[in-house]
Amino acid sequence: MMTTELQAWLTLALTPGIGPVGFLKLIDAFGSAEHAAAARAAQTEKLVGREAAEALQAGAAAEPARAALAWAEGDGCHLITLQDDDYPPQLAEAASPPPLLFARGRRELLARPMLAVVGSRAATPQGKRNAEDFSSALAAHGYTIVSGLASGIDAAAHHGALAHPASTIAVIGTGIDRVYPASNRQLAHRVAAEGLILSEFPLGMGPLAGHFPRRNRIIAGLALGCLVVEAGNASGSLISARLAMESNRDVMAIPGSIHNAQARGCHRLIKDGARLVETVDDVLDEIGRLPAAPAAAERETEPEAPPLLLSMGWEPVLADSLAGTLGLTPGEVYAMLLELELAGRVASLPGGRFQRLAQL
């Protein structure tokens, strides 16, 4: 896109109140971003409303647009518009596609087949393990994993996918120069270096509540399907799943214990028609195996479970209860649990409880 048209495109995209829907109305009405940006407020008001029309005429986006152009000169920094050849076609066909995306990292990942992996911020240890293991296996089969860089399931999905060339895309609800939550700063830097970060928000924009449903529509729009690993009834990840369903994308959910509040959103999705999946092969049966991807590897035999693990079952349990069941002292049980925790086979939970972790 030529510089003058790009500047006009940035002006429209970054003017407060216009939004993706208003942007497209302006382009349709005036034929180009340059003509729309030069129009009088009286001409644009009927399309985007009075406040947005006045903000456009007053040049409210001038500084954000200059900052965006300067930012795009940095290494690995890109401005991607709806008119660019590599704008993902599946996102362009979604409802209210973002006219402008800030991108940092491997832009070529936008051309890959993508799968969204989402879920609860307050994930259980088993949920995080499932997200990481499924994402790693699916990335090994050639799918780029898309998620939202949130705590819990999102972070685990990114970590798992980063182990493979297909890597991961993080869609964020802040300006691309911000990291939220701050605890994911190191992960964000790694995704920017080895994967791709996307945002539709101006530089410097903070994590406002209304941004995350908008972020979720991009996640759903990019991906061929959506896998919900663990989600409560109020989880924002259900928005991504619903949007994917409305766009006729494959939606899958991993079931959990009926006692796990973080599994109830998945159960509800399954009742509403999402595919129940238990293995990576279940996911690939739903979304398809990529032609160049290797055949699904045979699952390695899980090490034989020691008596302590067999006694634990799959629900959280107190160490003292295990000691009574096995006829051991609490000290002996705690020593065994520590060894299993270090091996990644159990997780310690609040209240002195422990839970066995399944392994793919």
Image: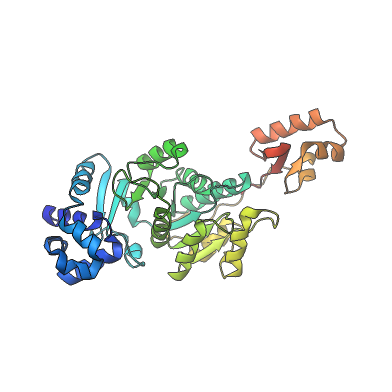
Q: Is 53 displayed left or right of 251 in the figure? A: left
Tell which of 277 and 280 is nearer to you. 277
Q: Is residue 72 left or right of residue 139?
A: left
Residue 224: image x %, image y %? 43, 63
List x then y, in percent, for residue 22: 26, 65
Q: Is residue 285 above or below residue 204?
A: below
Residue 308 visible (yes or no): yes
The quadrant in which residue 74 appears is: top left
Q: Residue at x 36, y 45 (%)?
A: 206
Looking at the image, what colour scheme do you see? Answer: rainbow
Give the residue at x 72% y 45%: 316
Residue 82: x, y in percent?
26, 61
Left or right, 184 with reference to 325: left
**Nearest the eye: 20 or 309:** 20
Q: Residue furthest right?
A: 327
The image shows residue 244, relative to residue 340, as above or below, that is below
Residue at 29% of width from left, 62% of height from top? 20
Of 241 and 351, which appears nearest the observer?
A: 351
| Residue 166 in view here | no
